[in-house]
Amino acid sequence: MTNSFPIAGPETLLGFASRYACYRGVRLPQLMRLTGIKIWHYASFETAVSRLGAMSGNDPTVLASHALRPQDAALHLLRGQMISRRDVFREAARFCPHCVCQDFATGGRRPIANVYCRASWLNKLLTVCPDHQIELVSLSQKYLGYAREDFSSALTDNWAEVLAAADAATPASVSAYDRYFTSRLNGNGAANELLDALPYIGAQRICEIVGAMETYGDRVAISKLPFEELQKAAKLGFDILSSGYEGLRSILQKRDHRREESDDKGVGKQLYGSLYTYLHEHAQKPEFAPVVEFVRDHAFSVHALGPENNFLGSGGVRKLHSIRSASVQYGIHPATLRKMLHASDLLAPDCDLRDLKVSIPAEQMDALAARWKDGVPMLYVRKRLDASPQVITQLTEAGHLTASDREIDHKLKKFYSSSQIEAFIARIEDLAIDQTSVSTDMVPLKHCAPFMVYAEIISLILEEKLAVRIVKAAGAQTTLSHLRVNEAEVRQAAGVGIPAGYYDTRVVAARLPLTVANLGKVVESGMIETTQYRGPNGVATTAYSKASINAFTRTYICFRKLARQRSNWEKTEQRVADVAPVFDFGGTERVYRKADVGL
């Protein structure tokens, strides 16, 4: 397509149509009437733009992007930027006199056709030209009405007034606010970390709100400010936000102390005033999401706000929890939460703060709630492991399970960790040598209970010193009753059976015919060495050193051993009448030195 009469970058579509009509030697209404190009008519807009594009050599989609089109009763779209309908100036031709003269000076067959209407000239809030640093002006002659906004013809008809305005142009101070919003509306590029992502009207409103809050306080009614005061506030707000989110953070930080003074309802508005109100109204719009998330995250990092506050909708990175917000999020009763916080020393027992006023770091509250949800009572553990309370206590004392002690001040029960229990079972399952076959030498743990408790057997399994098998139905959860171990290996590990080099009590009683009590007294004298071992029933039993027994019998003899039988007791009494016993326990419970009795 030959671009015979290109549209300028910052130009409005209606201004271009007016300039093209001037270029063709007619006025805009006449061009529309002759060609049927009714740009102002919504129903035929696409057809009109397509026809104008074909006539002027422009892409219709490019022309459409320069249009001023209503979006709803309150908003217009101008050059792709959303602008408030009340901010659009359409009563008369508005322009920068120096820009107009500069365009006109480019010459040509019709110099007035070189003057194009910048989009920024239609925004009432932009009052100066950043390029020439003078105030914008408007012609005294108004447009004849809707659909008769003929910019080029208006300048032609009032050229003397245009030249006079150029000569009498008023110098103006150009702010960063003017440069940014003029450049953005004209499509010349702009850069602001915070404002760029917002719609044009949103960026302007936030600047106005921030500036007004800084100047007049949070309760100021923006709509009631005079135009001049609103302009000053907008420029101040832009200067504050020129540093992006850090500037916004500074505004929020100045107001964070108000949370302590506010009640629970409307906490957002009481914290951040008009800024919160505006963001809350637009919280669901994607264009506002970065700013909304930033303000919400900042508030959550300083205040214990929760879902019940409905602070800028849902979501956000929470840094603090109140008891109320934690209760809503985790489903834990507030009274229970207070007990948990007391137990963890996160809340003083005499704390009289209301649930909404308590502030606990979110990571600590998350960990506390996770432990609470993971905790299970003894009854659950008994069913899960199919074990008695005594066995569970043994496992706890052995360190295989951990019970949280919550019994001191807060009257909560002891709880076990369900995740730890499952990890404990999974570890045993990993060590099982076979989960299907059954061996006759493998018995349930209860068969070994007389000589080794469950906790000791499981310790050996976990230390891989004892083989284990699991026998259960397919799909069933593993419990302690499903474990099978080799009884002989357990007996050996438990030390069941007399050790080598020792006599049991029965053998010693045959060689030293004394009662067990009196034999113990001999042992206490240090003449006989002993050790302890587990008998077949698992009971600790005394064993006597063979060496010490043999040495003792070589030197000493008991009365009954000396008499050999009961019928010889009287004769033996006469034999030892003059011999002093080494041990005399009364009656026939005496021990003599062999040498003293002639042996």
Image: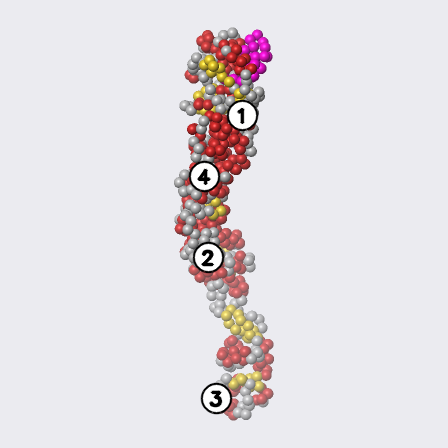
Which quadrant of the structure image shows residue 529?
Answer: bottom right
For badge 2, the amino acid type reads: Asp
Distance between mark 2 and mark 3 Cα atoms: 69 Å
N-terminal of the pair, mark 4 or mark 2, is 4
Q: Amino acid at mark 1?
A: Asp
Q: Nearer the viewer, residue 560 or 519?
A: 519
Judged by depth in the image, the label closer to the viewer, 4 or 2, is 4
Gap between marks 1 and 4 measured at Cα: 30 Å
The mark closer to the camera, 1 or 3, is: 1
Give the label on residue 537, or none.
none
Q: CA distance from mark 2 to mark 1?
A: 66 Å
* Alpha carbon distance from label 4 to label 2: 41 Å
Which residue bears the numbered disc 2?
405
Q: Nearer the viewer, residue 34 or 430?
A: 34
Q: Secondary structure at mark 2?
A: loop
Side (left or right) of 226 relative to 171: left
| Rendered image: mark on residue 178 | 1
CA–CA distance in space, label 3 to label 4: 110 Å
Q: Residue, x 49% and y 56% (percent of image)?
A: 401
251 over 554 or under it: above or below? above
Question: Which residue, given by chain and number where applicable, does mark 4 sit on?
Answer: 271
Residue type at tag 4: Leu
State how far apart marks 1 and 3 are (Cα): 133 Å
Q: Which comes sooner in the sequence, label 1 or label 3?
A: 1
Q: Secondary structure at mark 1?
A: helix
In magenta, the rendered stretch is 94-116
Q: Secondary structure at mark 3?
A: helix
